[in-house]
Image (spheres, helix red, strand yellow):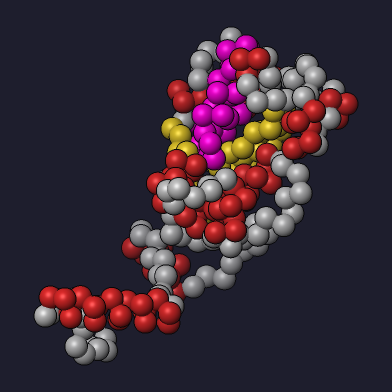
Amino acid sequence: MRQIVLDTETTGLDPRQGHRVIEIGALELVDRQLTGRQYHVYINPEREIEQGALEVHGITEEFLRDKPRFAEIADDFLAFADGAELVIHNAPFDIGFIDNELSLTAHEHASITEVSTVLDTLELARDLHPGQRNNLDALCKRYEVDNSSRSLHGALLDAEILADVYLAMTGGQVDLGLSLESAPVSDDDDEHRHTGHPPLFVLRASNEELEQHELRLVDMEKQSGSCLYRREETVEV
């Protein structure tokens, strides 16, 4: 499965008010593993940046003055996203801005969703944690993802953080290994090559979780007189 974890920075909050994309950052995951492929570009929006947006990302009009226009990068960007599932936090925001840029350039694709599907991690987080704060900073704290380098927002940095959060939320690998150094081949890797199936990720319960589980089984047993899930003995395999 190929996924692109994506984030954008913009001149303001609403493309309907003429605001534009100024940065795109994206990382490629294949079968939940970082491949090392990424797409990162700054874009000249040909308009001013709102003060509120500048305080969030720190990207100035002067810095962007010599950067390409969206029309110049559109084909490369869509080629990178083509066929992938886009993983985006608050996807309607980023998709709305990207589709607006495609419309302004009269591109043959009116929407990025013509070449990619979309997974909104904000909706996923709301399903998992209803009634709680689910912005990226709150999720980093909840899943113990290090975002200490995030004094200002940046599309590529936020995409890296979101990739960690997404993998943690969906029960898989948390550390992406962003150094991209080659890992030693394990017995599991060797088995993967022979069977065609990736090794299973095993998340073992903590001692505290095991104690809570045992207390719950005891309570069920008291209420019903028996508990089918209670193990009377441990069988070693």
**Relative to 109, residue 226 above or below:** below
- Vertical placement of 235 versus 66: above or below? below
Q: Is residue 2 left or right of residue 56?
A: left
Instruction: Tell me if 26 is positioned left or right of 49 in this view.
Output: left
Please name whichever residue, 210 or 193, is drawn nearer the observer in this view of the structure. 210
The quadrant in which residue 23 appears is: top right
State the extent of the magenta-drawn residues as a range.
Answer: 77-105
Residue 105 position in % (x across, y down)? 63, 12
Residue at the (78%, 16%) spot, across then down: 46
Q: Residue at x 68, y 42 (%)?
A: 156
Q: Main secondary structure of the magenta part?
A: helix
Q: Quadrant of the C terminus?
A: bottom left
For the residue pair 223 and 28, the one nearer the viewer reads as 223
Q: Horizontal and vertical percent for residue 201?
A: 41, 66
Q: Is residue 95 visible?
A: yes
**Image spot of residue 118 (x, y percent):** 46, 34
Is residue 227 in sight in this rendering?
Answer: no
Q: 114 left or right of 21?
A: left
Residue 80 falls within the magenta-colored stretch = yes
